[in-house]
Image: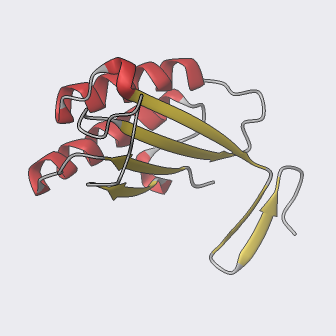
Amino acid sequence: MMPFIVSRTNVTISDKQEQRLKTLLGKAIELVPGKSEQALMLVFEPMSHIWLRGDNATATAYIEVSVWGNEHHRGYEMLTAEITRIFNQVLNVEPENVYVRYADIPCWGAAGMTFDRNNYL
């Protein structure tokens, strides 16, 4: 099922940078077993009002990764490292300013159907 990554950052993202982020995140999601770019949904929210340590001028990224059917968090450690590297490489966000939050999705709806971990509803 579809993984979903929402990226919020307080810097601008050019079309070229967004395309690069899309490509790199599409490859990175493969670190989670059974996931691929073919089902990946991405949202980029540049110029978000993000304050970190009392400052909003430091380049910062807050990433939410939602994954269905991975309750044992396989691949998350490697994915966190790769997401951090990607945002540093593409947007110059220092690694200590990249935060990744994971959401394990127990039930998901898509294409008019509902899915849970054990079966299709």
The C terminus: image quadrant = bottom right
The N terminus: image quadrant = bottom right
Place of residue 57 in the rendered image (x, y in percent of width and height, measured from the top left): 23, 38
Place of residue 110 in the rendered image (x, y in percent of width and height, measured from the top left): 64, 71
What residue is shown at x 47% (from left), y 31% (from top)?
Answer: 99
Question: Looking at the image, is 107 positioned above or below residue 73?
Answer: below
| Picture quadrant where residue 107 is located | bottom right
Query: Extreme bottom residue here?
Result: 112
Q: Is residue 32 left or right of residue 48?
A: right
What residue is shown at x 46% (from left), y 41% (from top)?
Answer: 63
What residue is shown at x 44% (from left), y 53% (from top)?
Answer: 38
Question: Looking at the image, is 35 positioned above or below residue 75?
Answer: below
What residue is shown at x 84% (from left), y 64% (from top)?
Answer: 120
Query: Extreme front residue here?
Result: 54
Q: Is residue 53 left or right of residue 108?
A: left
Compare residues 24 and 92 and report the one nearer the observer: 92
Question: Looking at the image, is 13 positioned above or below residue 31?
Answer: below
